[in-house]
Image: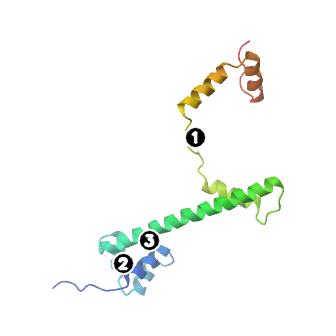
Amino acid sequence: MAAKRIEFDQQAFVLDYVSGRMTLPRLAAKYGISTSLASKIVSGQRRPEVVEMIEEALESDRRQTQHELVRLQRAAMRTLGKAMTGEPTGVSIAAAREVLKRTMPQDPAPLSIPPAVRERRERSLVDLSPETKRLVLEELDGPLPPD
């Protein structure tokens, strides 16, 4: 005789699980299932449809988090912009900087420069007079060309 399938509100189980506010034993108790069954469910060993629901809910949370981060970044940029123009802000500049520091990539990908523009730039640097090159390098604290 096959074991009787325990019925419970899978959608509510998924939402509670994804929220992270309950331990697995508390979650199991709430839905009247054993901790062992709850563990097997969330690991995909039982009721694969629930794991799919969990993955969809987590992906939805990730998208929401991404949208919220973009909103925070925009607000931080507005705060810094106001601070730079001397306008009073209700938000700490340090808080705005911290948001950007924690949410922006540390090593942003370099901008792609079209080959024609790159070629034109390279030519324009080569065409500089030695004196202009020296002035630019001095200004940038770069190594000076040999005399």
The answer to whether 24 is drawn above or below residue 114 in the figure is below
Left/right of residue 36 with respect to residue 98 in the rendered view: left
The answer to whether 132 is drawn above or below residue 14 in the figure is above
Judging depth in this view, the residue of 29 and 76 nearest the camera is: 76
Percent coordinates x, y for residue 63 in the rendering? 50, 64
Q: Which mark is residue 9?
A: none
| Mark 2 lies on residue | 38
Q: Quadrant of the N terminus?
A: bottom left
**Label 3: few (<14), some or many (≥20) within 10 Å?**
some
Identify residue type, mark 1: Leu
State the SS at label 1: loop
Q: Which mark is residue 57?
A: 3
Q: Quadrant of the C terminus?
A: top right
Left/right of residue 44 with respect to residue 139 in the rendered view: left
Left/right of residue 129 with respect to residue 111 in the rendered view: right
Mark 2 / mark 1, whichever is N-terminal: 2
Q: Quadrant of residue 5?
A: bottom left
Question: Are discs 2 and 3 less than 8 Å apart at CB?
Answer: no
